[in-house]
Image (cartoon, rainbow, N blue to C red):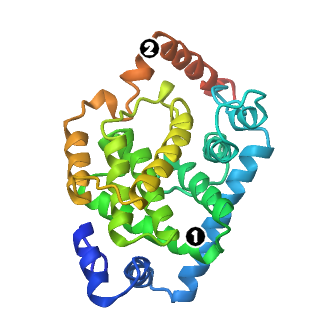
Amino acid sequence: MSLLFTDFASWQAHCATTGEPLYQPVLAYEIEQKGRTEEEIWTGLQRAYDVMRDAVHTGLTQNMTSRSGMVNNGAKKIAASPVTVLSPEFKNLITRALGAKEVNSCMGRVVAAPTAGASGILPGVLVTLQDLHKLEDRAILEGLLVAAGVALIIEQNASLAGAVGGCQAETGSAAAMGAGAIVYCLGGSVDETFAAVAITIQCMLGLVCDPVAGLVEVPCVVRNASASAIAFSSAQIAIAGVDPVIPVDQCVAALGEVGQSMETRYKETALGGLANTTRGREIEKMVLVQDVQILPDEETQ
């Protein structure tokens, strides 16, 4: 980590000293780590964002039924629902995040940001942000770099993996990445950007990883939608100047501490939580039987 930092305080201090925008040291890190030119990095970011947008579109237009049957075109159902609970903009956010994650559950093409299990959050957040505020792609790509910097620091000091830190480490980190990107893209200060990350972590702290039948479908898909909503609410709170009270680096430390103390059955093992409900176990048995392939006896071949 020669060009990026191990904590948010150092990242902020660097930008304060150099006058660089938040994305700049992350861009320099990418150039060094990948051994590519700046132009190539921007091209790669554009390609990643294009895949995110495609996932949103696919989730809302194509058949999204997973092999287990637990995922069944939820995004399209929400979009077509005759009962409106949310504002149109809020509803769009939910459907986009859920739809992009359904693409992952149906073995489609996604960007793991930071993981495949959280792959609907940044697409839902960034596509909605761009739509609401008519931002150019370049602004979104800078936001992606800021989000990447957030993820790298969380990974160093806590975890991004559900198997290590529970769902707080996956959807929680993705939501924090999204919240930081929102505030940055809307011209928020560094303090406000990092406050959004801190507030998001506070909201997601303690969330367990309990995938039914061990599949990244239930409750993962709906958590991508709810985490996107938390990213937006945290960004709004932060950009209004509300103090998270607990500094962002201490929030990340708390994320790591909670993840370490979390019992194994709540870390992607499908041994606890929703996976251990009566219905969860019934689904597990059905999925396991469905996936068994009876191979021909070698002696009969």
Can you give x and y, in whole percent of width and height, for residue 119 in the image?
55, 50
In this figure, which residue is indicated by the disc labeled 1?
A: 140
Quadrant into which the C terminus falls = top right
Density class for disc 2 (Cα within 10 Å; few <14, some 14-19, many ≥20) is few
Q: Secondary structure at mark 1?
A: helix
Q: In the shown orientation, is residue 124 left or right of residue 241?
A: right
Task: Reply above or below: 48 against 277.
Answer: below
Q: Which mark is residue 277?
A: 2
Can you give x and y, in whole percent of width and height, for residue 289 in the image?
59, 18
Amino acid, disc 2: Thr
Q: Is residue 236 visible?
A: yes
Residue sitting nearer the eye, 47 or 122: 122
Quadrant into which the N terminus falls = bottom left
Q: Residue at x 37, y 41 (%)?
A: 204
Task: Reply above or below: 282 against 44.
Answer: above
Residue sitting nearer the eye, 143 or 84: 84
Amino acid, disc 1: Ile
Q: Is residue 216 visible?
A: no
Q: Secondary structure at mark 2?
A: loop
Q: Residue at x 62, y 44 (%)?
A: 90
Q: Which mark is residue 201?
A: none
Residue sitting nearer the eye, 73 or 293: 73
